Image (cartoon, rainbow, N blue to C red):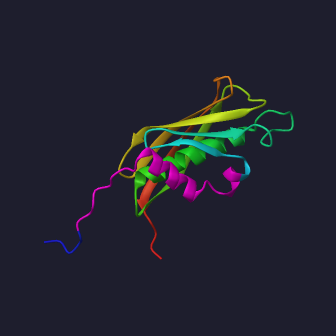
Amino acid sequence: MSDQAPVEPFVPPTESEALAWARRRGVGALAAKMGFEWVEFTIERSVATMPVEGNTQPVGLLHGGAYVVLGESLGSMAANLYAGPGRLAVGTDINATHTRSAKSGLVTGVCTPIHLGRTMTVHEIVVSDDQGRRCSTVRITNLIKDMPRG
């Protein structure tokens, strides 16, 4: 007989509960400063926008690092939602391939899981411009571990 209490199964939140959780938790100071805005948030699909203005290189194109900030914010939050209560997802690898430059308006990141495992998640984030053209593809891997005590 085990001395441990039985583990309650994780019941994923509804879309509105998940979006409310994400908005309460926040996206961190950097993503907030860059104008990150939630559109949709579930374990299966997360969407956010970010303005090009204020996030550009000296030549007026959206900075490559801005694509990565959008992608990491989406992928990490999605992984943490999937991890469930008492667990934490932390990034271990991220990469991005930029295929087009956004010059104005908003970019939209759409995050979908590639792998959802017990201790690891992998998400792909496709970032598109206002015309729906793919500008960057970001992939992030997160390790899921128990939340630190204390």
Query: Would you place residue 92 above or below residue 138 in this image?
Result: below
Query: Would you place residue 4 above or below residue 115 in this image?
Result: below
Considering depth in this image, is 15 or 52 the residue closer to the camera?
15
Which residue is rendered at x = 84% and y = 33% of the image? 60
Which residue is rendered at x = 68% and y = 57% of the image? 29
Considering depth in this image, is 16 or 148 the residue closer to the camera?
16
Which residue is rendered at x = 57% and y = 53% of the image? 23
Residue 6 percent coordinates (x, y):
23, 66
Count numbered badges in the picture. 0
Which residue is rendered at x = 41% and y = 54% of the image? 83
Residue 104 percent coordinates (x, y):
78, 31
User: Can you tell which quarter of the image residue 71 is in?
Assistant: top right
Residue 133 percent coordinates (x, y):
65, 23
- Can you name the residue that lies furthest to the front here? 16
Residue 73 percent coordinates (x, y):
59, 48
Q: Which residues are magenta?
A: 6-32
User: Can you tell which quarter of the image residue 139 is in?
Assistant: top right
- Can you name the residue that lies furthest to the left here? 1
Residue 19 lies in the magenta-colored region = yes
Relative horizontal placement of residue 11, taking residue 128 as reference (left or right): left
**Quadrant that contains the N terminus:** bottom left
Relative horizontal placement of residue 56, taking residue 146 as reference (left or right): right
Residue 7 lies in the magenta-colored region = yes
